[in-house]
Image (tube, rainbow, N blue to C red):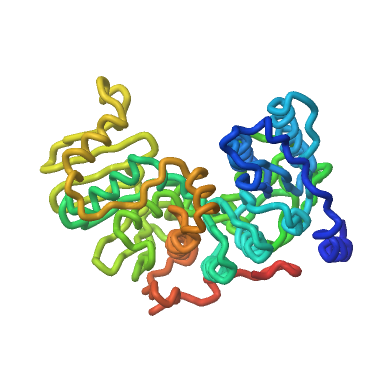
């Protein structure tokens, strides 16, 4: 569809789209009233949203009514999954899921209440802003945005719209991470001195060769706000794939592992420090110059230094002990001795993650003064927020603080820069170049 045709469509779409096919009430639980179900649209049908889709398809308090992807194969595959799932539930054929190549067509539908966005990073902000302006609540994958400017603009758009926005930093909804942060926040390991976060390399510039175009892929739309680079299947794999494509390792479209796993682990580090509403005050470049892949540091107002290094995921080091946490892994050390932990199945036989986390909670947090937001499931938490209109566990502002810290760390690698940062103003205090905070936008896709 051309740009002009898309504009024409958007002017009439709200009135032209037919009503969705809603499954008969007998299919749903009697406890789930039809008007309490959330109609969902999915944008970006790669591996991440494939997982989200399967999760939401099994829920009775929502219905998937539309999917969107610029790749025909992935789009039609997702639509087929929805129709098949609801067909089995209804005991017959189901053709009620629409499929779009342009996210604006999906957002123009008045019957869609909320959207799940899992596109490559360079589209996150633009689509997120468009979604809340269209009156949709949003589950937006991390990292929240491609740059600092976008984080600020998206946060403002969400606040202005009054919509619910859950950042997909699902580690906050896992007990081991919450308990680890509560141990830190309540002083169980004393005064925090340093933190080590462990994840992969920063992204490099695009350096891929051109391949023949993938049939059915709107490559111009895929590149969107970013530069129109030659098509390469490493960025957008051919057909339906079951891996995380390496577009995230190109600066033009992602931020490397700094904004991938780093967006998870730095998020937990800042939750433990209690700086969700601020961020670092200083950024230090790594040793080793342009070839460095580890060693960048974020320094916080209380003097804590966070280092990107090798370790156990997120490691808090205090004056009285240590806390290490990763997915499915947890350790509490006091006085140089591991008092509770499940990190290695071979070394920690006879116990379990849940047991060690629960014991730590019972013994050291019984009279805790600081209790953190408890979410047992990230998707449930979002759907509950849609009903209550209260902020979810990882609201857009939290996602913004986290991703800004990730972007600042990337600047240290990309520019070999040491600089001071003003977290309240979200601006450089000393050193740094304001150009680093944004990007050159292509076409009409400026944020």
Answer with left or right where residue 166 lies relative to residue 243. Answer: left
Badge count: 0
Residue shown at 80% from the left, 51% from the top = 218
Kindly give the residue lying farthest to the left in the view shown: 335
The answer to whether residue 90 is above or below residue 323 is above
Residue 79, image x, y percentages: 75, 38
Residue 268, image x, y percentages: 37, 51
Residue 178, image x, y percentages: 33, 46
Nearer to us in this view, 347 or 342: 342
Picture quadrant where residue 93 is located = top right
Kindly give the residue lying farthest to the bottom in the view shown: 430
Res. 238 visible in picture:
no
Residue shown at 67% from the left, 30% from the top = 27
Res. 314 visible in picture:
yes
Q: Quadrant of the C terminus?
A: bottom right
Kindly give the residue lying farthest to the top in the view shown: 350
Residue 231, image x, y percentages: 75, 50
Answer with left or right where residue 5 lies relative to residue 334. Answer: right
The answer to whether residue 187 is above or below residue 419 is above
């Amino acid at each position: 569809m051309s740009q002009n045709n898309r504009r024409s469509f958007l002017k009439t779409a709200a009135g032209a789209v037919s009503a969705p096919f809603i499954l008969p009430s007998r299919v749903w639980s009697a406890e789930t009233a039809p008007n309490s179900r959330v109609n969902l649209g999915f944008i970006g049908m790669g591996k991440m949203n494939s997982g989200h889709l399967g999760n939401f398809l099994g829920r009775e308090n929502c219905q998937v009514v539309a999917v969107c992807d610029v790749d025909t194969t992935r789009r039609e595959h997702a639509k087929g999954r929805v129709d098949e799932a609801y067909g089995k539930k209804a005991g017959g054929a189901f053709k009620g899921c629409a499929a779009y190549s342009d996210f604006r067509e999906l957002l123009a539908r008045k019957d869609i209440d909320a959207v799940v966005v899992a596109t490559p990073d360079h589209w996150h902000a633009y689509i997120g802003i468009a979604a809340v302006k269209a009156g949709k609540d949003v589950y937006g994958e991390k990292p929240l945005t491609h740059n600092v400017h976008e984080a600020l603009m998206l946060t403002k758009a969400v606040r202005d719209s009054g919509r619910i926005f859950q950042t997909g930093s699902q580690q906050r909804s896992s007990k081991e991470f919450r308990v680890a942060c509560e141990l830190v926040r309540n002083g169980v390991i004393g005064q925090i001195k340093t933190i080590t976060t462990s994840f992969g390399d920063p992204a490099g510039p695009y350096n891929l060769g051109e391949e023949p175009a993938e049939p059915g892929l709107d490559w111009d739309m895929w590149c969107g706000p970013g530069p129109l680079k030659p098509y390469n299947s490493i960025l957008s794999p051919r057909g339906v794939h079951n891996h995380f494509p390496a577009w995230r390792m190109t600066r033009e479209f992602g931020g490397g592992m700094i904004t991938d796993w780093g967006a998870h682990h730095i998020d937990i580090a800042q939750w433990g420090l209690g700086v969700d509403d601020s961020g670092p005050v200083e950024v230090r470049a790594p040793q080793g110059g342009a070839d460095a892949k580890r060693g960048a540091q974020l320094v916080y107002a209380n003097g804590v230094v966070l280092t990107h290094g090798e370790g156990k995921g997120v490691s808090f080091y205090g004056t009285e002990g240590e806390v290490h946490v990763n997915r499915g892994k947890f350790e509490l050390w006091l006085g140089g001795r591991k008092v509770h932990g499940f990190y290695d199945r071979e070394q920690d036989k006879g116990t379990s993650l849940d047991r060690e986390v629960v014991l730590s909670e019972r013994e050291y947090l019984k009279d805790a003064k600081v209790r953190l937001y408890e979410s047992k499931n990230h998707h449930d938490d979002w759907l509950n927020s849609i009903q209550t209109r209260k902020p979810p566990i990882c609201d857009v502002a939290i996602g913004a603080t986290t991703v800004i810290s990730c972007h600042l760390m990337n600047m240290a690698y990309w520019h070999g820069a040491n600089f001071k940062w003003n977290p309240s103003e979200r601006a450089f205090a000393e050193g740094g170049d304001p150009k680093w905070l944004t990007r050159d936008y292509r076409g009409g896709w400026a944020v």
